[in-house]
Amino acid sequence: MNMQSSRTKAPARATLIAGVCGAFFMSAMASASAETLTVWSGYPEMAPFYEHVAEGLKKKHPDLQVKVEAIALREHEKRVALGLSSGGSDITVIELAGSTATRYLENELLPKAPDDVASFVKDPQNFGTFFSDTASYDGTVYGMPLFRGQGALYYNTEMFAAAGLTEPPKTMDEYSEYASKLVQRDASGKATVSGWSMRLSGGGQGIAEKFWVNLHQYGGALLETDGHGKWKAGFANEAGRKTLKQYLDNIFVAKTVSPEMPADADAFERGQTAMFIRESWVIGDIAKKAPNLKYATAPLPKGSIGLPTNLYVAGEEGKTQIGWEFAKATNEPENLVWLLKNVGWLPNRSNVDYSSVTKEQPAFAAFVDYPKDYSFFTLPSIGPVEEILTRVAAQLVIAFGDASLAGDDAKIDAFLAKTADEVNTILTREGLLAK
Amino acid sequence: MTISSDHNAAEHGEGRSLRRKKQIVDVSIDVFLFVVSILMLLPLVFLVANAFKTPAEMLAWPPTIIPRDPTLENFSAVLGETPLLRWIGNSLSFAVMSMIAIVATSAIAGYIFGKFRFRSMNVIFALFLATAVVPFEVYMIPLYFQVKALGLLNSTWGLLIGYLVMSFGIFLIRQNVIHAVPDELLEAARIDGAGEFWIFLHIVLPLLRGPLGALSVLAFFQAWTAFAWPMIIATTQSSYTIEVGLALFQTGFTVDLGRLSAASATVLIPSILLFVILRRNFVQGVASTGMKE
Amino acid sequence: MMAILPTLAIFAYVRLYPIVDTLRLSFYKWDILSKRKPFIGLENFRELMGDHLFQSALINTTIIAFGVLIITIPAALVIAALIFYRTRSRLSGFYETAVFIPHVVSLVPAAMAWKWIFDARLGPLNAALSFFGVEPQAWLFDPVLSVICIIVLCSWQALGYAVLIYLVGFKNLPVSLYEAARLDGASGPQSFWHLSVPMLKPITLYVSVVTLISGFNVYAQAFILASDAQGAPGRQVRVLVLDMLENSFRNYRVGYAASEAVVLLAIVLLLTLVQFGLLREKGKA
């Protein structure tokens, strides 16, 4: 065994490594000692916005260190759950969808907002009741509304022109017709550019959320409430059948899209799909990654998801002052206009003049100037909502891969009934099932 | 690989033809093994090659193996935009500390189990061995809550909690103590009035250098490649280990394969080098895992 | 003597206690966020029985574990035999290193490399296939192919370890037996099949169980090949550890996840018992 050489070198190596490690610990400790505020976000593209707000706050608090930690949404939700249930952390401004926050509020894991914030939020001049309600629990304000996820159609105008289409589709039937006209195929007939990119694969709940958006156009909902805080599955019906059928027809009959085709904003930016439904942040993403893309947006046929995201403040009691100050600063008109212009998420505050941005970027029109009867839905504020969406998503992935479902209404109905049962079982387990 | 099989085709004779047959067999085995080796390495070669490709070439069809117009763009972008070096530092300190902890606990416990074989000790040792079959994944969730209670989340110490002891390490040292540390030597030292601790430090440890070296390399790589545990313990960007950092790097909205490859290559190359340097210790360590009866 | 106490304490704290706690939690409705964490007996296990996500995780994991086993063991045995045969060759060190490197490189970068290889649009695998006139496949999206992808990735990583252990086994085989066989006119492949394979049985058994157990713990590979990346996702192959982590850290149902862990533990114990049983049987025979 050639142990000799490694034996003599080991101490030197160990000293070197120990030195490197020591340096890392020192640097970690140094950064912890200054007055710091941590911002947790679930959207990496929001990081510049929070840094911008922090910059503005520096005038008043020159010593303040703001650490913005923006990571992927699922990981963000995980760290919030684990961080909040352990308590006693640093002062942290946490960005959370209203529906996700409820479970923390139910268990008293987030403090209520101070009076000045509460009255700011409750002022109907500032926020519509939908937004102030989602930032509240039992009538008490806990969060500062910030932005919302709202969907619209994005379409590639050059591809539309090439297919002889001048107007965006207005009904769900037209979506399918357009997809057939827009799809581009290679010599063997295989789609190379999808007509309408639908969310068909991936892990997690996104598939179910997107399904719900389409379902909404047909008048259905994944979850329906009885108005008394109880819920039940609402898709084992005609609306559900039409929605799923449209997916399956596009995949297996018209073959305008397939699970393995590049999808989402990525594909749209690279000209690999002609149209897709997504939130407003894509406008900012396109401006950054594909500034020359010719595209336009349009409202959806009937209405959209409206998913308000609020800021909450966690941390040692009595020390959260600075966190709330930060939350208030995000809602200053200058910052909100900056948010819309540079990031693209839609601010919720109403009495701010956004026209400088919306005039310059017509794509925002579909998100702000929607028809009078446009209807919004949001995710229910119940604990197991993510588990339900994840399970529905897992079922949908199976359906999207099952060619025998296409065109077979009885099989589609059976599939929907089975999935609805699964959802209702979870609701029963948590005592949330509506009769 | 350039041995030509027919350069001595003209030669005859029974023995020669036999030898020639053997040579052909040898060469074809060599060719086969060489191809297998290349296939095993190919994915890593691809990864490193991708790190040097431009975004346009990344999307080109058919894919290229060797970058047409190599760029360092990906590396500078990755090093500029992500705390890659910090993640490597986190992994490094975690792996080194885990290595020290495992070597220390294994040496002490292995020695005591090896030399003081009373009935009670044997029972405890059996317990150590029995838990060795329980996969870490089975009990990592309760362990997570223990770390949380200690307030050690997002720290190297928290990571370390999961990697303080290694049942196999204790077993390995115990076997070596039984076979390589003669009782007479210890007795002689005791008669000379040496303390137990002095004996352990100056007599036992030097005799165990080989297995301890193998164990260190094993422990280091075990922590270096850990994934599930750091994934739940480290949830802030600054506390990620390199594995977690890389895995989450790809979950942004849009994936940039070139940069991802550059980041991966930055990690891969040093760890392969380290492995090649320590190969003998490592092989010995791994080989000894197969030696349990 | 007393010096063992700190080690024992650490061991009890980081190993014994959490194992016992896993068992305990599996009988509770233990949700991270709720204040009430009631004892519910076997309710978690009853729910597991009817949980199709858990079932598909269990099935996928089992297929992956046995798939890796079936590929790795014969391949490792043959490769180890050939490397052993060519021990004197200058290249033998290279072979050993090349085969072993996938086992030591960080998992995530390696999985990334494979993710690109399997990529339906850009990957070299489909490029190679279309060169031979084979229709390109959606490797990471098809329900069957995506499982195969994970098996290939895991086998690639497991092979080096198995080869190494076999090499040790070959080195310990008595040379005289082979000499005798050769005098009796046995060819290389014959003595491999009739001598080496039977004599290496204990090692085969050991490597098989290790491979199976690590197969049952597969997680990172599935996570990387189809993680939540929204731009270019793949099909999520649900495996046990993934389902467990999702239940505890996404759905906050720690008790339920613990009951899954108990099932995993039961499987691993069963496999280990089978190994010991077979070894003992062999000892008697």
Image (tube, coloured by chain):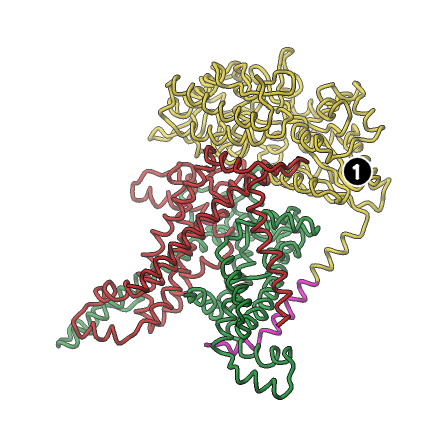
Chain colours: A yellow, B green, C red
Q: Nearer the viewer, residue A343 or C152?
A: C152
Rendered-image quadrant of the N terminus of chain B: bottom left
Q: Residue furthest left?
A: B13
Badge 1 sits on which subunit? A
Residue A5 counted in the magenta span: yes
In the foreground, B77 or C89:
C89
Looking at the magenta stretch, what is its main secondary structure?
helix
**As drawn, is B30 to the left or to the right of C224?**
left
User: Compared to C129, does B290 lie above or below?
Assistant: below
In the picture, measured across the screen, residue B207 lies left or right of residue A123, that is left
Residue located at (70% from left, 63% from top): A22
State which quadrant residue B189 falls in: bottom right
Which quarter of the rendering shows the C terminus of chain B? bottom left
Q: Is residue C218 left or right of residue C192?
A: right
Looking at the rendered structure, the kind of residue marked 1 is Gly
The residue carrying mark 1 is A323
Is residue B42 shown to the viewer in this render?
no
Above or below C62: residue A382: above
Between C85 and A355, the one lying in front of the other is: C85
Please identify the residue farthest to the top as the structure is shown.
A373
Relative to C25, residue A354 above or below: above
Outermost residue to the bottom = B192
Q: Is B20 in the magenta? A: no
Region of the chain picked out in magenta, as a range: A1-22
- Give the secondary structure at mark 1: helix
Q: How many marks?
A: 1
Q: Nearer the viewer, residue A194 or A312?
A: A312
Residue drawn where x is 34% and y is 56% of the image? C73
Residue A132: give x, y in percent of width and height: 74, 23
